[in-house]
Image: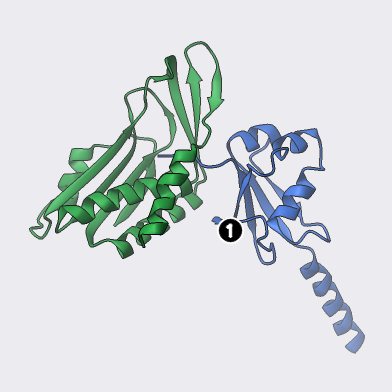
């Protein structure tokens, strides 16, 4: 059980190896990796800068992770979120969930991403090749994605 | 001696009445305010997070601009998300920021 905020790139394969090493109770591992897209509606992007709220970010990710562990039969999970200036193609976020059966691992990974997007205090700023810059607006669809978990309970 | 005790009691009561909080700003709220954080003495009559935002908005044009869309600006109290109606009493850190866009 871990959450990390770091500027450095992450290595999904190495993280899976570390989480599964020496264990034989795990039946399935699900990973989600979010990447920086190189354009916004065709407008070329130079970089994406992630600002966050040190202290609250770790606390909020911890609360989200604790909720996932309470809802799903997880053996372990990991959330790594990067901060600072990232370039197209780089990883932004990594979620790894481990369970005896795949259902819980898939569901928990989706749950973690939906809650992370609406609750973890990160803000993205886009810097474009044409010199413009823009804070990303929150998407209504993210709120809808989170809200469906309220109904499922 | 009893009058000294009364004076000391009176002073500590006055200190307790003035609440100081660290106010932190993030993303475009930070850019518009022009600073990342500051110490603020909570004025009398300001009891909630929403009232603090309303008071901050009166401190100058940069604050007015940052809090112009008060319905969009979100808040956290001691690093936990809260609604504008949350009471400030006992809090040490208040943060204002746009809706989050991580992930």
Residue at the farthest bottom position: B2
Estimate the x, y position of residue B52 in percent, counting from the top left.
74, 53
* Residue drawn at (29%, 37%) of the image: A33
Chain for colour green: A
Q: Describe the element under mark 1 as helix, strand or loop.
A: loop
Is A24 placed left or right of A81 in the picture?
left
Question: Is residue B1 in view?
Answer: no
Q: Colour of chain B?
A: blue
* Residue drawn at (81%, 42%) of the image: B59
Is A134 placed left or right of B96 in the picture?
left
Q: Does residue A128 sit above or below A33 in this rendering? A: above
* Residue drawn at (23%, 49%) of the image: A106
Estimate the x, y position of residue B81 in percent, counting from the top left.
55, 55
Q: Residue A92 falls in which quadrant of the image?
A: top left
Q: Does residue A34 sit above or below A147 in this rendering? A: above
Circle count: 1
Quadrant including the C terminus of chain B: top left
Quadrant including the N terminus of chain B: bottom right
Residue at the farthest top position: A130
Question: Is residue A134 in view?
Answer: yes
Residue at the farthest right position: B3
Residue at the farthest front position: A151
* Residue drawn at (83%, 61%) of the image: B45
Is A135 placed left or right of B68 in the picture?
left
Query: What residue is disc 1 on?
Result: B78
Estimate the x, y position of residue A67 in percent, counting from the top left.
37, 61
Q: Residue A101 falls in which quadrant of the image?
A: bottom left
In which chain is the residue bearing label 1?
B
Q: Nearer the viewer, residue B95 or A104?
A: A104
Estimate the x, y position of residue B94 in percent, counting from the top left.
64, 53
């Amino acid at each position: 059980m871990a959450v990390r905020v770091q500027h450095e790139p992450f290595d999904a394969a190495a993280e899976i190896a570390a989480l599964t090493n020496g264990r034989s109770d795990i039946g399935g591992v699900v990973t989600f990796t979010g990447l920086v897209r190189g354009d916004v509606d065709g407008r070329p992007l130079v970089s994406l800068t992630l600002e966050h709220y040190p202290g609250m970010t770790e606390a909020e990710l911890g609360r989200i992770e604790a909720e996932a562990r309470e809802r799903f039969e997880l053996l372990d999970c990991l959330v790594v979120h990067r901060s600072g200036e990232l370039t197209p193609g780089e990883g932004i976020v990594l979620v790894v969930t481990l369970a005896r059966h795949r259902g819980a691992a898939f569901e928990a990974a989706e749950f973690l991403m939906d809650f992370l997007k609406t609750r973890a205090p990160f803000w993205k700023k886009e810097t474009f090749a044409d010199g413009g810059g823009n804070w990303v607006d929150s998407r209504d669809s993210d709120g809808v994605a989170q809200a469906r978990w309220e109904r499922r309970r | 001696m009893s009058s000294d005790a009364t004076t000391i009691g009176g002073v500590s009561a006055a200190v307790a009445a003035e609440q100081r909080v660290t106010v932190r700003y993030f993303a475009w709220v930070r850019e518009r305010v022009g600073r990342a954080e500051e110490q603020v003495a909570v004025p009398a009559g300001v009891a909630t997070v929403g009232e603090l935002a309303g008071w901050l908005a009166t401190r100058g044009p940069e604050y007015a601009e940052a809090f112009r869309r008060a319905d969009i600006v979100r808040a956290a109290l001691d690093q936990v998300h809260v609604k504008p109606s949350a009471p400030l009493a006992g809090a040490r850190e208040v943060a204002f920021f746009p809706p989050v866009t991580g992930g």
